[in-house]
Amino acid sequence: MNENAIAEWISLALVIIGTAITFIASIGVIRLPDVYTRAHATTKTSTLGILTILLGAFIYFWFVHGIVSIRLLLGIVFVFLTAPVAGHMIIRSAHRSGVPLAAISVQDDLQTDLERAKRTAVETAGGTAGETFGDTAGGAAGDADGESVGSPGAEKG
């Protein structure tokens, strides 16, 4: 086997692996219960799948045809940087819009962090939560430790 044949097999393996990973991501979009887990499936696994497909194409063109494709390299960098950020922003906007978590979700770390930031801002400003953030209820419900027990879909007073 020569160098070109090995490069073809490696690039073929990468493309097949990337396709399988992307297929698993599509199954996750269908099977997972809420927008948060679906977005996680699409951003994480699809990014990995697309990156391995593009890497396979890059290796193929580099070794077989002797072409170093700047477009493929830019595509790899662009997907690697933008897909996770876009997924994060979609999930964050869904959370802020009040889309509820699935019933099987154990905890909501973002809600806890937002309420902690709200309390810190209120303490710094010297006012109440309603004055600082326009919330008429004056804050969210919490347990004895001051941690949040609410969910993003809970009604605000």
Image: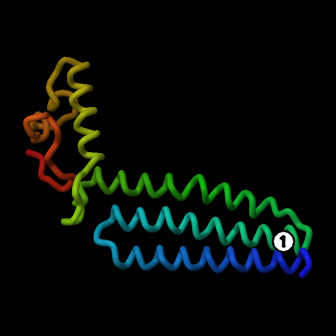
- Say which of 126 and 148 sits in front: 148
What is the three-letter code of the residue carrying label 1? Phe
Q: Is residue 3 left or right of residue 146?
A: right
45 lies above or below 81? below
Toward which corner of the image does residue 21 lie, by quadrant? bottom right
Quarter location, residue 120: top left
Label 1 crowd bin: few (<14), some (14–19), many (20+), radius 10 Å: some
Give percent across and percent down for residue 98: 23, 55
Image position, residue 74 (x, y; %): 72, 57
Residue beneath label 1, please?
61
Relative to 119, is 39 on the left or the right? right
Q: Tell me where residue 131 appears, x and y as whole percent.
A: 16, 28
Tag 1's secondary structure?
A: helix
Give residue 151's position: percent from left, percent from top.
18, 52
Seen from the viewer's position, the closer of residues 62 and 98 is 62
The quadrant of the image that shows the C terminus is: top left
Looking at the image, residue 123 sits to the left or right of residue 59; the answer is: left
**Residue sitting at x 9%, y 40%:** 143
Q: Residue at x 12, y 47 (%)?
A: 156
Left or right: 155 with respect to 62? left
* Of residues 32 and 87, the one drawn nearer to the viewer in this rendering: 32
Most distant residue in the front direction: 1
Q: Nearer the viewer, residue 144 or 90?
A: 144
Tell me which residue sits at (23%, 65%) in the image: 102
Q: Which residue corresponds to the image point at 61% horizontal and 69% vertical from the top-left?
A: 50
